[in-house]
């Protein structure tokens, strides 16, 4: 009887802490540089993405991602966003809201808004209410790549940025709740967990 009670308590604690062995990871998806990204933020983004995919014209979506893929892409988003914000601060990168809006308008003028939103939600787990956030990250990437490898070709610049972000990731520390997988800093993506 006592053994069953102890087992029940241990199991209950594991469930309440988000299946994490680390107290600081309890209830979190990831901790970056001591900053907690709650599992609820990831769940909210996943819910938005899933709802948007369901109401998006199927002819605009090349492939419907699985729930595991959506979860991974949502977690990847939060990690990369934190890394880019740190890079912005360290490198003195300035991207204004006006810059983002001009870039958004340029992209929407070239491609239909619905097509862009469908591709972003299905391929990158970017809900419609974060399209500008995604475009801001693209602008930061471009500036950072040029800053790290001025005048070089795209591949060289991309590799320079990846090396920079990998080093930054290692320096800041990216701790993923095992439920959400593990962080692969050399590829800047997560690998699936036991979601």
Image: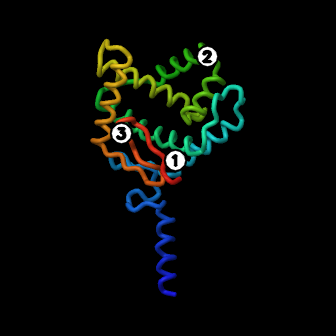
Sequence order check, earlier mark of 3 and 2: 2
From the top left corner, tell me how far across and down residue 97 is, in percent: 47, 25
Sequence order check, earlier mark of 1 and 2: 1
From the top left corner, tell me how far across and down residue 138 is, in percent: 45, 25
Sequence order check, earlier mark of 3 and 1: 1
117 lies left or right of 93: right
Q: Secondary structure at mark 3?
A: loop
56 and 190: which is toward the camera: 190
Q: Are marks 3 and 2 in contact (CB under 8 Å)?
A: no
157 lies left or right of 115: left
> Residue shown at 48%/21% (left/top)?
98
142 and 194: which is toward the camera: 194
Q: Quadrant of residue 130?
A: top right
1 or 2: mark nearer the eye: 2
| Total numbered labels | 3
* Residue tagged 1: 41
Task: Give the distance between the C-alpha atoms of the residues marked 3 and 2, in whole angstroms.
Answer: 33 Å
The 10 Å Cα crowd at callout 2, few under 14, some 14 to 19, many 20 or more, is few
* Residue tagged 3: 185
Q: Secondary structure at mark 2?
A: loop
> Residue shown at 59%/34% (left/top)?
129
Task: Give the distance between the C-alpha atoms of the residues marked 1 and 2, in whole angstroms.
Answer: 30 Å
* Residue tagged 2: 111
From the top left corner, tell me how far across and down residue 66 is, in percent: 60, 42
Q: Are marks 1 and 2 in contact (CB under 8 Å)?
A: no
The 10 Å Cα crowd at callout 1, few under 14, some 14 to 19, many 20 or more, is some
3 or 1: mark nearer the eye: 3
3 or 2: mark nearer the eye: 3
Furthest residue toward bottom? 1
The 10 Å Cα crowd at callout 3, few under 14, some 14 to 19, many 20 or more, is some
Task: Give the distance between the C-alpha atoms of the residues marked 3 and 1, in whole angstroms.
Answer: 21 Å
> Residue shown at 46%/73% (left/top)?
10
């Amino acid at each position: 009887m006592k053994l069953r009670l102890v087992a029940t308590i241990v199991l209950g604690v594991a469930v309440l802490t988000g299946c994490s062995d680390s107290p600081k990871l309890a209830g979190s998806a990831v901790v970056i540089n001591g900053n907690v990204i709650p599992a609820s933020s990831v769940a909210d983004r996943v819910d938005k993405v899933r709802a948007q995919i369901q109401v998006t014209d199927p002819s605009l979506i090349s492939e419907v991602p699985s729930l595991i893929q959506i979860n991974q892409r949502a977690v990847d988003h939060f990690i990369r966003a934190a890394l880019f914000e740190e890079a912005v601060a360290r490198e003195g990168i300035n991207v204004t809201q006006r810059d983002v809006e001009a870039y958004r308008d340029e992209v929407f003028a070239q491609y239909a808004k619905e097509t862009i939103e469908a591709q972003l939600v299905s391929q990158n787990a970017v809900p419609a209410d974060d399209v500008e956030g995604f475009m801001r990250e693209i602008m930061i990437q471009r500036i950072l790549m040029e800053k790290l490898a001025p005048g070089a070709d795209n591949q060289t610049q991309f590799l320079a940025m990846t090396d920079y972000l990998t080093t930054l990731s290692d320096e800041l520390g990216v701790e993923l709740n095992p439920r959400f997988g593990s962080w692969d800093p050399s590829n800047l993506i997560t690998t699936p967990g036991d979601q």
